[in-house]
């Protein structure tokens, strides 16, 4: 009787709806916790048990909800097709009972599955359906998450502007409602979008804000993703040290997550889940077989199956163990090699930067005394020297010009090697450009009794879009080289098309001469820096051996190739091939201001006052002599602070400002002057490398730049031009 009562009471408890509902809820909560803790097999067991109870009690809401969670679990395990089936079951039930809240969540997970499958159109449709349900139910947290997923989908499909707008909505909603997790993840996703849109500075700021929130609230996975995204952002902006630091943080956190999950990859989750599932199934088989202990043959079969099962499981476990060890060793080796490569890369970058800084410093220090050499030689030649001194002064001037050319060549090589040369395409007339180069070099050719022949393919269009300055530099170097090594001969320049692909022409340029030629041995090293034919040739013909190295570097930048054919005492042919885009647009007219025509009769030079700001005494003397010769008065100051004071208390027409001086630099002094006088003409009279500092000169507010050492004619033209323009402005007023 007591046994019957106990059994009936047990049965009544098991059938109690409230108790069964509590059990369903408990198992669902447990499965969600298991998902968070990477225990996918345990989550699967709890979901199956909860589903059995829900079906038994005909609890359709729980049935639909459990199928939706199963779909999410299957997505994590990479079983997309199973996930779709589970979610379809969930949606079918939830539609019937109008469970809009959970129906929206199912649509959301459905979208995640199709995003994973890269079916972006279906994913977006699912997210839109989810948004509709969340808006109806007023579920703002879920709405923010769905907007974020929708934005990620647009980003994946490369619709970056649309992605930015959608993620901005998610971010605004998350901020308003205080959903920190969504806010953190949205900031990092928005950083990726801004990077794609070309605003890397904004992207880095957004990622930093997202990381800060994730770190504060211990959102481990989001923080890990934030580290990786930020590393990529810094890498794109060439800030390699910061990129490496964030990559290391990402790797450390990834290792920590793997230790927690005890699984190395999604495939590992799948294997462990399947292994656990098979173990449980085999346990059930063993239990059923054990019930048939009376059957001797069955017992034997059980023993055989058990041994086979244990053997299979042992082999599988051993295989997993070995694979795991191999993976760990490979990862360690990759980390080690990556570290070695990073160190080597940093050393190379440091060496390159040190070399560039050294060359910049040396060339500046060389330009300053060269200013004295060229300036004094020009002044002395203009002051009626003795006949026997003229040749000496011309030799001095030639040496100064040669040194300046050598310095400029070194700087050009340095810029090419440091990848600091940008391509600046523009429309121009190629035939006209080459004709101008021939005219410019014709005097040098006539000095060597050389005739230049130019052949341009009659069927070839003349207008192209390309970097005409670099093409000019290449041709000037090659033609100049032929002129130097040819006496009493001819030079042929030819241009023709050899290929057309996707509206891009590949043109071949040939520069042929019948000069001294080049030996085969020397041809192998023609394009290396400081490479020349021989010491005797160097002594006889001069040159530094940098011209062809510059040519090779420029042609590489233009994505072309250069070749040489030569035979001693018969001549040399250089030919290069570069891609050019033809155009119907005629050559753009230059908008540069024309120089003063040289007529000073309309200028009242007696009232002009010029301030020379220069700390070098020799340079002060040279500049003053040049200005005196131009009938211009000047004051001289040797530092920036006094220059600012003088300009405040005097009315100067022009300021010639040196850059490197004791105290404040010329750039800082100019910034101060511009704070109280925006119209004063200020020339940067400098020996620094102009191209590298151009943005600093523009920001400081210089009117123009006169590089030292300068040609006296150009210097005079710039000053007279500035004074002429000032007079025109005064007359107009």
Image (spheres, rainbow, N blue to C red):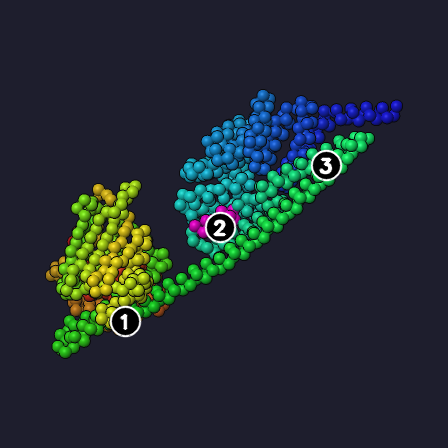
At x 34%, y 61%, the residue is 414
Residue carrying label 3? 305
Left/right placement of residue 296 relative to residue 410 reads right
Q: Nearer the viewer, residue 7 or 609?
A: 7
Name the element at disc 3: helix
Spatial CA span between label 2 and label 3? 53 Å
Q: Give the magenta-colored segment's residue range.
A: 226-236
Residue carrying label 2? 231
| Neighbour tally class for label 1: few under 14, some 14-19, many 20 plus, Cα within 10 Å | few
Q: Nearer the viewer, mark 2 or mark 3?
A: 3
Q: Residue furthest top?
A: 96
Residue 261 sits in which quadrant? top right
User: Does the CB distance between marks 3 and 1 fall below 8 Å?
Assistant: no
Residue 293 drawn above or below residue 255: above
Residue 369 sits in which quadrant? bottom left
At x 78%, y 25%, the residue is 11
Left/right placement of residue 90 relative to residue 430 reads right
Q: Position of residue 32 (x, y in %)?
A: 64, 36
Residue 646 drawn above or below residue 253: below
């Amino acid at each position: 009787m007591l046994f019957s009562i106990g059994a009936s009471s047990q049965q009544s408890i098991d059938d109690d709806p409230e108790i069964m509902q509590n059990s369903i809820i408990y198992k669902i909560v447990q499965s969600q916790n298991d998902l968070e803790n990477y225990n996918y097999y345990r989550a699967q067991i709890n979901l199956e048990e909860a589903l059995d109870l829900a079906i038994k009690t005909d609890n359709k809401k729980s049935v639909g909800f459990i199928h939706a969670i199963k779909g999410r679990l299957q997505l994590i395990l990479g079983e997309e097709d199973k996930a779709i089936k589970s979610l379809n079951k969930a949606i079918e039930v939830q539609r019937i009972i109008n469970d809009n809240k959970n129906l929206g969540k199912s649509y959301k997970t459905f979208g995640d599955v199709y995003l994973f499958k890269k079916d972006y159109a279906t994913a977006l449709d699912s997210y839109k359906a989810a948004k509709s349900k969340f808006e109806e139910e007023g579920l703002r947290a879920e709405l923010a998450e769905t907007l974020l997923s929708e934005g990620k989908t647009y980003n994946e499909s490369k619709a970056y502007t649309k992605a930015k707008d959608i993620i901005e909505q998610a971010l605004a909603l998350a901020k308003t409602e205080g959903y920190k997790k969504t806010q953190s993840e949205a900031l990092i996703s928005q950083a990726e979008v801004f990077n794609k849109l070309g605003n890397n500075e904004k992207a880095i700021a957004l990622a930093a804000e997202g990381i800060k929130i994730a770190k504060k609230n211990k959102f481990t996975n989001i923080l890990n993703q934030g580290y990786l995204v930020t590393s990529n952002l810094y890498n794109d902006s060439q800030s390699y040290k910061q990129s490496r630091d964030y990559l290391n943080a990402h790797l450390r956190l990834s290792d920590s997550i793997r230790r927690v999950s005890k699984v190395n990859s999604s495939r590992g989750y799948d294997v462990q889940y399947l292994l656990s599932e098979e173990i449980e199934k085999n346990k059930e088989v063993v239990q059923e077989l054990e019930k048939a202990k009376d059957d001797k043959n069955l017992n034997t079969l059980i023993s055989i199956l058990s041994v086979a099962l244990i053997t299979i499981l042992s082999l599988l476990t051993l295989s997993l163990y070995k694979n795991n060890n191999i993976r760990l060793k490979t990862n360690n080796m990759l980390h080690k090699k990556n570290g070695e490569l990073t160190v080597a890369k940093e050393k190379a970058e440091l060496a390159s930067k040190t070399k560039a800084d050294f060359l910049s410093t040396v060339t500046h220090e060389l330009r300053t005394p060269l200013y004295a050499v060229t300036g004094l030689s020009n002044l002395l030649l203009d002051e009626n020297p003795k006949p026997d001194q003229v040749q000496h002064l011309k030799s001095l001037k030639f040496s100064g010009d040669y040194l300046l050319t050598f310095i400029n060549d070194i700087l050009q090589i340095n810029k090419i090697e440091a990848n600091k040369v940008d391509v600046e395409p523009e429309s121009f007339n190629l035939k006209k450009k080459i004709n101008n180069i021939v005219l410019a070099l014709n005097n040098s050719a006539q000095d060597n009794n050389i005739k230049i022949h130019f052949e341009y393919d009659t069927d070839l269009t003349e207008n192209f879009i390309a970097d005409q300055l670099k093409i000019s530099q290449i041709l000037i170097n090659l033609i100049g080289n032929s002129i130097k090594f040819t006496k009493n001969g001819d030079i042929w320049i030819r241009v023709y098309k050899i290929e057309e692909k996707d509206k891009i022409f590949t043109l071949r340029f040939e520069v042929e001469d019948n000069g001294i030629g080049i030996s085969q041995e020397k041809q192998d090293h023609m394009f290396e820096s400081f490479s020349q034919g021989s010491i005797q040739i160097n002594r006889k013909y001069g040159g530094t051996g940098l011209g062809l190295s510059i040519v090779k570097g420029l042609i590489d930048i233009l994505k072309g190739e250069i070749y040489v054919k030569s035979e001693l005492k018969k001549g040399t042919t250089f030919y290069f091939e570069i891609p050019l885009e033809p155009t119907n647009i005629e050559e753009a007219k230059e908008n540069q201001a024309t120089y003063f025509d040289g007529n000073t009769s309309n200028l009242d030079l007696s009232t002009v006052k010029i301030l020379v700001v220069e700390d070098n005494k020799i340079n002060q003397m040279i500049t003053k002599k040049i200005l005196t010769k131009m009938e211009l008065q000047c004051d001289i100051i040797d530092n920036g602070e006094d220059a600012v004071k003088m300009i405040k208390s005097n009315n100067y027409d022009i300021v010639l400002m040196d850059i490197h001086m004791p105290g404040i630099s010329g750039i800082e002094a100019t910034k101060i002057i511009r704070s109280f006088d925006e119209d004063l003409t200020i020339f940067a009279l400098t020996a620094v490398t102009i191209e590298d500092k151009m943005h600093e000169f523009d920001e400081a507010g210089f009117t123009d730049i006169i590089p030292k050492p300068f040609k006296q004619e150009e210097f005079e033209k710039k000053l007279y031009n500035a004074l002429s323009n000032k007079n025109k402005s005064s007359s107009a007023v």
